[in-house]
Image (tube, grey):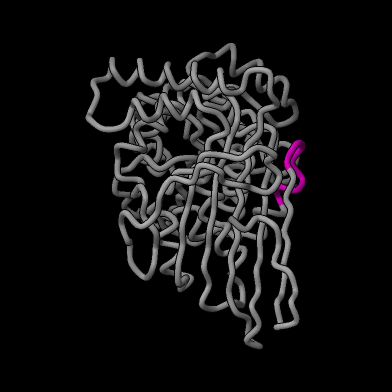
Amino acid sequence: MSPRRPPLIGIIGGYGAVGRSAASSLAARGRFRLRIGGRDPEAARVCAARIGGFAEAMPVDAGDTGSLARFSLGCRTVLNCAGPAYLLGDRARHAAFAAGADYVDVMDDGRTAEAVPGRTAVLSAGLSPGLSGLLPGLLAQGLRGAEFTGCHVGLGAFTRTGALDYLLSMERGYGTPMAVWRGRVVTGALGIQEHFQVPGVPRPLTAYPFLTGELVGRAQELGLREARWYNAFDGSALLAALNRSRGGHPTARDLAARAEELVRSSTLDAAGRTPYHVLWGRLNGTDQEGDAVSRAVVVRGEDGSRLTGAIAAFATAAVTNGQVLRGVHQASTVLSPQAVVDWLGGVPGVTVHQTTAKDAGDGAEVDEGVL
């Protein structure tokens, strides 16, 4: 009897920055066959050849239902790394389900995701949203009355697709600026921090409070007393461009121009400097003995696309291996935070640092990273 063939994972946008990272991360496990897809057949072929082993290339247009159906046929799981997610919609998810495949997406298309019997989908399996929503659960284990503060800061040039998704997410109700969670969403409670400090980032940052729907959901589930999130900026050009872009409902032409401005301004901020992305979280609470405990985590990567692809690869492997319950889920609600962090620890160029400080009333110091 011939040995059982490894399951096939199709990666839409598989030769892009995020797709390549996800493919490499999955290929390193050696337990899957990969189908690399995109609109450029030659780019897909070159990417598959570089991966080697069980990788094949197949053209696919993420905006064409028929093309997505052909690409998904025979796959155990389809991973969507194409974008902009808010413009492509839910076509890829429906095509995967129709072909009998499960589905993972680095973003959320913003559409109501109805469950399909027997199928699994994990959405928002990227850096933010995704890893950002896993940090509270990673830190909150065994603590009560907890207060969480988190932050994402990145230095590096936006891709055009990344810039478009960033702009569209700002206008689709992804979160509430200047808000904090205190048992409910309290608007206007926080202000801009001009000299925000994040562990591992040597320069003071400008941080904007932005309470995401993802964090609200995690705060409710974990019973957090308070939760806040900041998007921080290491430079002035990107921040100024975003401020000019806020508000209104631009036409497609305006949106494209604004995205190009974000690409230029992010490139300007990063000029002559080493790119990085950092997600930091700190949670203060009380343990079962009544002692005050402060836990913190810093995840740092040289490249945001590499981090995003690695997280998407973890989610895809978990779904393909049957480790996620049937249904449609947000990544932060179903993935194991510690397992994701352990996976990231094996990714080149990524470091994870976790600390715990306990104050039993003897003057013990709390970890660095306090605002």
- Magenta stretch encompasses residue 239: no
Residue at point 66% right, 60% down? Answer: 296
Farthest-out residue, top? 42
Where is residue 137? Give x, y as percent.
56, 64
Residue at point 41% right, 24% down? Answer: 241
Q: Is residue 271 left or right of residue 116?
A: right
Answer whether residue 2 is visible to the viewer in this image: no
Where is residue 32? Give x, y as percent.
67, 41
Q: Is residue 343 above or below residue 253?
A: below
Q: Is residue 33 above or below residue 124?
A: above
Q: Is residue 137 above or below residue 55?
A: below
Tell me the chief SS of the magenta region. Answer: loop
Q: What is the count of numbered marks?
A: 0
- Magenta stretch encompasses residue 344: yes
Residue at point 58% right, 38% down? Answer: 308
Farthest-out residue, bottom? 289
Q: State which quarter of the image contains the C terminus.
A: bottom right
Residue in front for this viewpoint, 95 or 252: 252
Answer whether residue 307 is visible to the viewer in this image: yes
Where is residue 203? Give x, y as percent.
65, 37
Q: Is residue 5 left or right of residue 238?
A: right
Where is residue 107? Give x, y as percent.
45, 40
Q: Is residue 85 left or right of residue 196?
A: left
Provide the residue span drawn in magenta: 343-350
Residue at point 70% right, 83% down? Answer: 361
Residue in front for this viewpoint, 273 or 93: 273
Residue in front for this viewpoint, 114 or 234: 234
Task: Tell me where residue 55 sits by quadrant.
Answer: top right
